[in-house]
Image (spheres, rainbow, N blue to C red):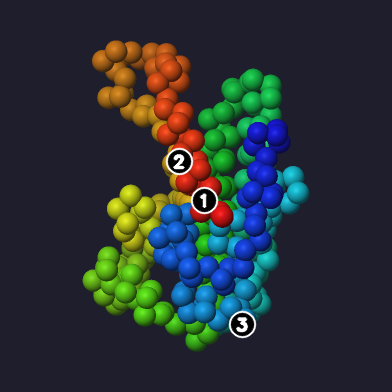
Amino acid sequence: MTQETRPDPEARNPRRDFLGKSALGLAALGAAGLAPASASAMSHGDKKKGFDLFAAPLDGKGHYKLPELPYAYDALEPAIDEQTTRLHHDLHFQGYTSGLNNALGKLAAARDSGDFGLVQHWEGKLAFHGAGYMLHLVFFDGLAPAGSTSPSQSLRKALEKDFGSFAAFKAHFSAASRTVEGSGWGILGYQPVGDRLLVLQAEKHQNRTQWGILPLLTLDVWEHAYYLKYQNRRAEYVENFWSVVNWDRLAERLEAAKGLHS
Ligand code: MN
């Protein structure tokens, strides 16, 4: 991995206790694309540990690590059986972790060599494994032994604001999860620009994206964005895009995004 892609462990990984985060509130949790943890779990910090909310576990070289479960393999019985949790975490989650690191390494090698011939392939792998890594991070961190937590008043209020009632939220989330076509996820997420909680369905989970990413710079490559001037010469449009980027705004967005870490 090249220097530019290697996250600075000091900057990226303030080893923050999952349980002391209530001051950040739902907005900050959601802005990082992470489903809010139960507020009551946060208030019982001495009893439970979870994953870091904003910092994936990284090794000294900036590679993602498989986080250890914050509970025993059989802690979710009978709702989720021990063998499933063991296989799901140790094999499937590990697979996404290794795949994400591999894709990042291949893309770093492409930048080093200047050979982007396989960029589409590795971007696909990056999306598949990166999305899988982040969604499993939130999934396993979002679970706790039955009866050990309950929704706080403030969490209920936040859910009522955007879903009408706590029951309606659960019904909506359940229906969305039940009706995913094929493989996928039911997801509660926070949309920063509308200050709104949303229930989403994800079919598969990659589709060339990753959950939890904050967009910092975007380039529209739908034909409507360039066809009148460039017709089929998208590469020329992409090259010229760089001449009109607002680097000041990009720096501001990056600073704001990294502020979620501080
Ligand atoms: Mn899974």
- The response on whether ligand 1 sits within 8 Å of label 2 is no
Q: Looking at the image, is 74 positioned above or below residue 22?
A: below
Seen at 70% across and 33% down, the residue is 2
Seen at 52% across and 62% down, the residue is 138
Q: Which residue is mark 3?
A: 47
**Quarter of the rendering containing residue 74:** bottom right
Nearest the viewer among 255 and 106 is 255
Give the amino acid type for the residue marked by disc 1 in the picture: Gly
Q: Earlier in the sequence, mark 3 or mark 2?
A: 3
- Answer few, some or many: residues within 10 Å of disc 1's Cα (few below 14, many 20 plus, some between 14 and 19): few
Is there CB contact under 8 Å for labels 3 and 2?
no
Q: CA distance from mark 1 to mark 3?
A: 28 Å
Q: Do we see residue 235 in this rendering?
A: no
Q: CA distance from mark 2 to mark 1?
A: 10 Å
| Residue 236 falls left or right of residue 44 | left
Q: CA distance from mark 3 to mark 2?
A: 37 Å
Seen at 42% across and 34% down, the residue is 249
Q: Secondary structure at mark 1?
A: helix
Q: Which residue is mark 2?
A: 253
- What is the x, y in percent for residue 57? 66, 56
Q: Which residue is mark 1?
A: 259
- The response on whether ligand 1 sits within 8 Å of label 3 is no
Nearest the viewer among 44 and 236 is 44
- Answer few, some or many: residues within 10 Å of disc 2's Cα (few below 14, many 20 plus, some between 14 and 19): some
- What is the x, y in percent for residue 237? 39, 17
Q: Earlier in the sequence, mark 2 or mark 1?
A: 2
Q: Do we see residue 100 in this rendering?
A: yes
Image quarter hosting the N terminus: top right
- What is the x, y in percent for residue 115? 63, 21
